[in-house]
Amino acid sequence: MDNGASSYRRFLDGDEGGIMEVIRDYKDGLILYLNGFVQNIYTAEDLMEDTFVRLVVKKPKFSARYSFKTWLYTIGRNVAIDYLRHNSKTVSVSCEDLQRVQSEEAGMEASYLKEEQKIILHRAMGRLKSEYRQVLYLSFFEDFDNGQIAAVMKKSKRQVENLMYRAKISLKSELDKEGFVYEGL
């Protein structure tokens, strides 16, 4: 049982500190993962909160079939998909707000990712198709294996392998446009 699972189990048993540990350990990565869906860091933060509210209110049962992180990201993915389904209308944003959001998002990325290569990689991934971004993000930034990615994305391992292959080719093309070579591809 990983640390997140034990913290969540403590929460289910009545220890409020357990959910605080889960939030502390997983919130930043979950925000960036959800941002890949909605392309708005503020909305991603709201969706992260909604994910944890779902844990606190509904208290879903965690089965050790997958890692706790895989289970949590699957819940987050479902929250994001529900949000996108209900808010498919285009929202107008002023140029000042857009610039402010972009600058704040870049600051958060820099503090979380820390390494120059990962920042460039993350930006290039932002220009990829949503499925490509998801599979690469889960693999590169969250260190999920293909089985865990398949569980989060509700695909077979073979589909994930094919998707990963196509995503890497697409990402390499984006990085080549910038003149950047990433050894991990």
Image: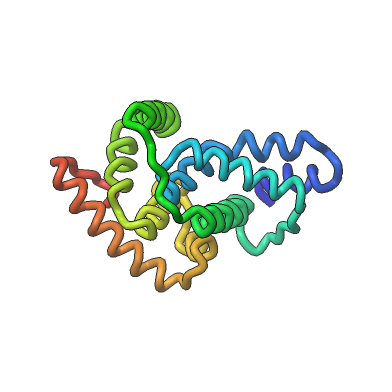
Rendered image coloring scheme: rainbow
Residue 104 spot, x, y in % from top left: 41, 27
In the picture, residue 52 is in which quadrant? top right
Is any atom of residue 173 visible in this view?
yes
Viewer-nearest residue: 12 or 115: 12
Above or below, 27 against 64 in this view is above
Point 24% across, 44% down: residue: 182
Point 24% across, 57% down: residue: 170
Residue lying at the far right in this picture: please name it.
14
Above or below, 73 against 116 in this view is below
Is any atom of residue 114 visible in this view?
no
Count the labels in the image: 0
Residue 114 spot, x, y in % from top left: 39, 29
In the picture, residue 93 is in which quadrant? top left
Question: Is 182 left or right of 62, judged from the image as shown?
Answer: left
Residue 76 spot, x, y in % from top left: 57, 51
Point 71% across, 35% down: residue: 20
In the picture, residue 60 is in which quadrant? bottom right
Residue 1 spot, x, y in % from top left: 69, 52
Above or below, 22 against 96 in this view is below
